[in-house]
Amino acid sequence: MVRCFLIHTVCPVSALGAGESRLLYSRLFGPDEGIFSDRERGLSPEERRLVQKERVAVVARQVRSAVSLSREASARVLGETVPGEEALALQEADSGVVRLRAGDPFSEEMSALWLGVQSLGFTLVCEPHENLLLAESTLRNLARHCLEHLHMLGQGSEVLLRSNRVDALLSRLLPHGQLLFLNHRFAQALEKEVAAYMAK
Amino acid sequence: MYSHGADSLIKQARDIQESELQKFYSRLVKLLQGKELGHEAVDSLQRLHLILSATKYTRTLPPELQKRVQSLLSSPKEHFQVLSSAVLRETLPLSGQEGNYNQENISQLNTHAAALLLSQAGSRADLSSLCAQLLRSLESRQSEGPAHSLTHTLPILNTILTLSPECLTADHVTLLSKKLVDWLRYASITQGGGASSGGFFTGPRSRQPVPTAELDGAVSGDFFTVLCVGQGFTEDQWMNVYSFSMLRHWLLTYHSVSSGNGTADIDDRSEVDGSVVSMVSATSSSGRLLPPKERLREKSFQYCLRLIEQSDRKAHKKTDTDLQKACLVEAVCILDCVCEEDASLVFRAFPCIKALFGRLSSDLSFARVLLPIAQFYLNHGEMAAVDCESVWKLVFGRFPAELFNDHFLAHELLRFLRLNLKSLQHRVPQYTRSFPNLLKFLAWDSPAVVDDFVDLLPSLVTAGTAVELLHTLLDLPCLSATLVLQVRSTCLPISEPGGRGLQSPDAYRNPSFRGLFLFLLRGDAGSGDTIDRLSTLHELLAETADWPRVVQCAQTVPLLLHIFFNTVITGADEKLLSHLILVMLERSSLLLNIPEYSKEIHRVFSSHLLRFCKLRPSLVVDQSHELLEFAGATANVYSKEEIYTHVVWVLGEYLSVSCDSRCSVGLITSCFEALEAVLFEITSSVPPPGADCPAPRVITTLMSTLAKLASRSHDLIPRVSLFLSKLRTLTRGGSVAWCSDEEDLVAIVTRGEELWSLLKAPGVAQSVLTPPPHVTTPQWHRDTNVAMPLRLRALTSLTHSQ
């Protein structure tokens, strides 16, 4: 099961401190894991939401630092692609996986897969025993759709103003955090539905 | 991509004034009261979502607005379902509305409303009732509604199963197992969605059912799986996909559901039934005699075998080829899982797995598929008496050596090692010898995998290979540089036109230096601790010291050394410890010249040298020759100050008869003379060009050590006293060439005076500077000789002697 899907910055942001990451989209799947832990059971719903937001922020920060270290080591020069070159941007994207230890921040160990497309990162946090090959291709697919449907290579902020499109996309390709084994025909059928949603 | 505009939008949303917010709320309420909701409503709801989600502090909506938004959950237009679910997830449920998980119509909820319900669940009880409702709806199979109305049921159940398996009961398990069998094995094998066999004419004549196809275009000859394609799909084919997607997790977790008393008996019975049946016949018709869980296992088994066969076909599209790989991984994992539960299946599964291994083992692009196969061999190989040598050769040989730069493989391989550590140490002897290969993952991408090595390194430390491991760890940055050179030389042409004048690529290709690099790139331990021409290697790689990968690697080495030494010390094998001390002394000057690297390593060495000697004081006498050689070289004061200080200190502390009876007067005298010579030299001359003045700590340590040694051999006391008084005279003149700070000088001189006056009474000096063990490790109440209770008892018995 995928625990969450995030879209966040992986480049320095002037308004934030070094190493901080701005979250543009975050979606947690399933019930809050706090209701099962003795420590967090007594929390009020507001406190629970706060803890969830903090958790997600921790993941974003860790991925941000992993991305910058990886880019530093491989001495990548980030190309500037323009809208229309989504396929190229995706091809040039770097990817990796971060091991999140138990307790930091989820109660159990998790694997955070990331895909860095220039200044933004797409992150999928899943249980470590999940099929990471499938998770990787799902992540790429999600990123491709987000780049295209939200015109993310441009200067606009559609990812903030049209987050419902990402929700709809996730409800088809990653329903409730479930990774799906979709061959190209099944994927086409789902993508048609997504396209129909986006057109309205 | 990320613009200033986006940043300011978030800031605006966060900092919105309360009055403006209330105006916005009332505008929105009015908007939602209209009959036809259009684009404006969508945009406004979206803005509301942004305002709510931009801050981590929860905002509550006015009840009127919240009720309106809630009613949109069941709107016919999906946009409103999505937005209302998203908005309500970011705020609190209305008081009195939460925990409404016992509604009758839960099964009618669309997927977005269900997501909201899941996220608002406050307890296990909520989830249990949600679970029960969903399963009831599966049972009754309401077939009206769009094709996907049932499909979100399985993902939701999987979510609940992940976080709280106890929400399902044994009956639920039975029910769902039965359903899964139906969908997995008996989905229709004709194309759905009104596919016709051809042409323009779509009249009833051409509405013949068309069979589904395989990925390479051939017609499907067997039951439907995720690797079958068609123009359209029927509902049960969709459920086939959703079922397979959660199958592994289901098989892993369904035992941890809350089981009633009956299941234990049922399991026992069916184990016997199942194993007898599957050994007798391999046909699927026998499955009908089995209870649901066992039947599911059998069908899953068949499904996986079919997937493995289907993955051999050449798919037309790249996404399908990728899917085939993912399916292979999943199939092998599921086979592993069912074989764990029913050992008799191992004999049926192994031929297939073996054939798969044979097919894939020479193709490195399938490396990630070969890992689950290795897991299968590890779990069941012994039982099936299969030779696993070739598997381990791949996992510990080719994969790290050739695929060290594949992040995902590294992650999965290291995870495999972590999870199976005990098993591997027990069954795979080459594991502990394979560290030169495994460390390649670390040398290439330290930040990503250092965490894994923190967990794995202790298991790689063995008495036989510890010394070689230490050398390898110290030269990890060199390995890092070598791997970069290796990758570059395979990617770039031999002669780089107008290359940046780098020396290292040429050195890498130079045959006379080949041996050096080949040693670093070796796969197994055991061919020698290190090489003679290490300094040559360091010179060749000197220019790589600022390469980012090398620097990142160097930053992880001190941590790993700490773990290494901590592991070694628990074994406390004295021979090994003394050998390691020698290595530390030798390597302290033989490190790749990266800024700060030597300093950090010296710091690690110093702290562990201290620990070793504290644990086994006789080590100092053992290695006195080498330690003296080190301490007697004045150059070491300037270039290796930290280690030097500690070596002198341990000599002072532990070179005594009370620590080791082999310590002779002659030894103490020769040590004294060596250190005295160094102290003379550094306090009577200017530091060599390029070096700083020695730190006061070095000088005071030398003085203290000399005093300690003198207190054990009283003939030496006059010599020390003479030196100390001379020092006082010399420094009376003011500044000296070997100490730049006046305060430091004062401290040194004060120390000298203290020692001088202490040495005036040799007996006192001896007990202060070489205290007997019972003073340094007092027992207090643990020592029966001084124990208070004993004394009291003695006194009491004396006073009550009658």
Image (spheres, rainbow, N blue to C red):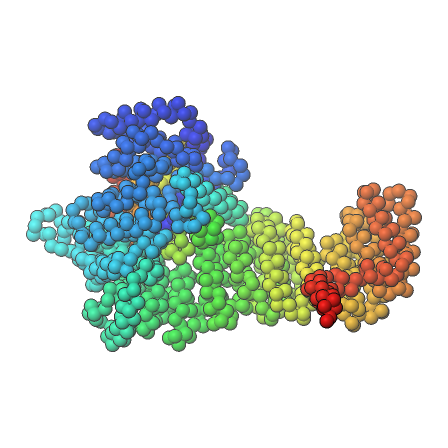
> From what the image shows, is residue B579 above or below residue B236?
below
- Residue furthest front as drawn: B802
Q: Is residue B584 visible?
A: no
- Please name the residue shown 27% across and 68% down the image: B266
Residue B104 picture quarter = top left
Residue A145 in the figure: left or right of residue B766: left
- Point out residue B9 in the picture as x, y percentages from the top left corner: 42, 30
Q: Which residue is drawn at 21% across and 44% down?
A: B105
Q: Which of B217 and B523 is in front in this view?
A: B523
Q: Residue at x 34, y 39 (%)?
A: B89
**Is B392 rendered above or below residue B749?**
below
**Which part of the image, by quadrant, shows the N terminus of chain B?**
top left
Q: Where is residue B173 in the image (x, y as percent from the top left)?
A: 27, 59
Between A81 and B65, the one lying in front of the other is B65
User: In the image, B69: left or right of B715?
Assistant: left
Of the pair B667 and B348, the residue shown nearer to us: B667
